[in-house]
Image (tube, rainbow, N blue to C red):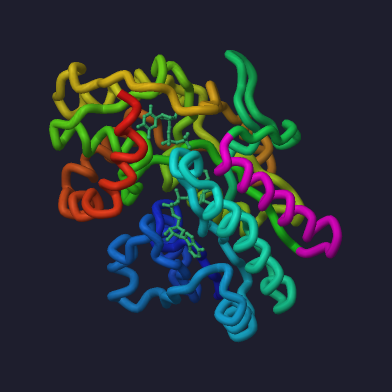
Amino acid sequence: MKRVLVTGAAGFIGSNLVHYLVAQRPDWDVTALDLLTYAGNLENIAVPLRDKKIKFVKADILDDGTIGDLCRSHTFDFIFHLAAESHVDRSIHGAMAFARTNVLGTQNLLDHAMANGVKRFVHISTDEVYGSLGPTGRFVETTPLDPSSPYSASKAASDLMVLAAWKTHKYDAIVTRCTNNYGPYQFPEKLIPLFITNALEGKKLPLYGDGMNVRSWLHVMDHCEALLKVAEGGQAGEVYNIGGSAEAEIPNRDVTYAILKLLGKSEDLIQKVADRPGHDRRYAIDYSKIKSHLGWSPRTSFADGLKSTVEWYLNNRAWWERIKTGEYLKFYDKNYGDRK
Ligand code: NAD
Ligand code: TYD
């Protein structure tokens, strides 16, 4: 039995990780923590909560008192740290929340983890910290950090603070850097769920720039499998790249066509809009380290993963329709209103 804390547990990857841990390690004691910002939704973990498979704590990772009490009272074996501000476009409109949560919040959690004997801290980061690739090559763990957006800059800063805890204090911390995830429960502001839900509503699909920016897509459950392998078998102080295989390195335009095809919708829904400032051209990851050290590789092909994801959004219309109201619409107008 292990005691684990998952931060950001009501968000996209965090909630999928909670489901994965409950299924794969049913004897573990899982505490789910989340501030429930606009991106956090308790519906995402309603079933394990209802079945009392997990405990839930609503808290800000910056809350000294609550985080300190939690770490003191639980002697966690692992913290999976996923709580973050995660959307590049929002970071362009305002970076402060990103500096606050991603940098200071991570440091607060790390300090309490270290002070209270949390055995291992797994910091979930992104390939975006490496910046933009040209037409060839892939990121390796030693690629210099060169982030472009306030989001990726805040993640790079937090990665370095976590690695400093290992270098300075020999605190058992690991950083993972993953490519773009997709799958159930992803907030419909990111490319794939935004385009699926807009198409279902008969709205335009706002494709930035020439649509030829390349992302490497990984199904969220493959990411969760990698995170569990890292927690159980990874080496302290190491960075592990996690990512999609070569077939899942796809220009946004082709992802858009694939979504429209699965939904039987017309390509006329595509609307080319002004590019994102500082838009990274291409991401691709070399995951040979985690493959050779921990035996992980992606299992889900992009074609299968996209098909099941489209089906999930078709079958869970009430989930995303409730989200696409209120605050969401204000952001939508701000981000897309002046792009046309
Ligand atoms: P998300 O935005 O869906 O979820 C983030 C969660 O963190 C939300 O539930 C939110 O309520 C919570 N949160 C925000 N601020 C908080 C605070 N101050 N205290 C406590 N909780 C807070 O994001 P996601 O896509 O699930 O990403 C999770 C992590 O994985 C992030 O660290 C992100 O950088 C990283 N990551 C994401 C991707 C991706 O493609 N989505 C890829 C690689 C890495
Ligand atoms: P996104 O899902 O925001 O992830 P990230 O910026 O972290 O990679 O965007 C994925 C790609 O899709 C990125 O190249 C930007 C592009 N994109 C659009 O073309 N239109 C959109 O409305 C959004 C949200 C993203």
- Which residue sits furthest right? 168
Q: Quadrant of residue 5?
A: bottom right
Q: Percent from the top left, x then y, of residue 49? A: 33, 73
Q: Residue at 32% of width from left, 66% of height from top?
A: 42
Tell whether position 109 is magenta: no
Residue 77 shows in the view: yes
Dominant SS of magenta comes to helix
Q: Is residue 327 left or right of residue 274?
A: left
In this rendering, position of residue 103 left or right of residue 22: right
Q: Relative to the observer, which residue lies in front, 230 or 187?
A: 187
> Which quadrant, please, contains the C terminus?
top left
Membership of 164 in magenta stretch: yes
Residue occupying image coordinates x 52% and y 37% = 179
| Residue 232 visible (yes or no) | no
Specify whether 314 is left or right of 307. Answer: left
Q: Which residues are magenta?
A: 149-171
Q: Residue 210 at x, y = what percent?
A: 40, 15
Give the quarter the ligand 2 occupies: top left
| Residue 328 sits above or below residue 144 on the image | below
Q: In what quadrant of the picture does the N terminus appear?
A: bottom right
Q: Position of residue 183 (x, y in %)?
A: 35, 43
**At x 36% / y 37%, what residue is drawn?**
335
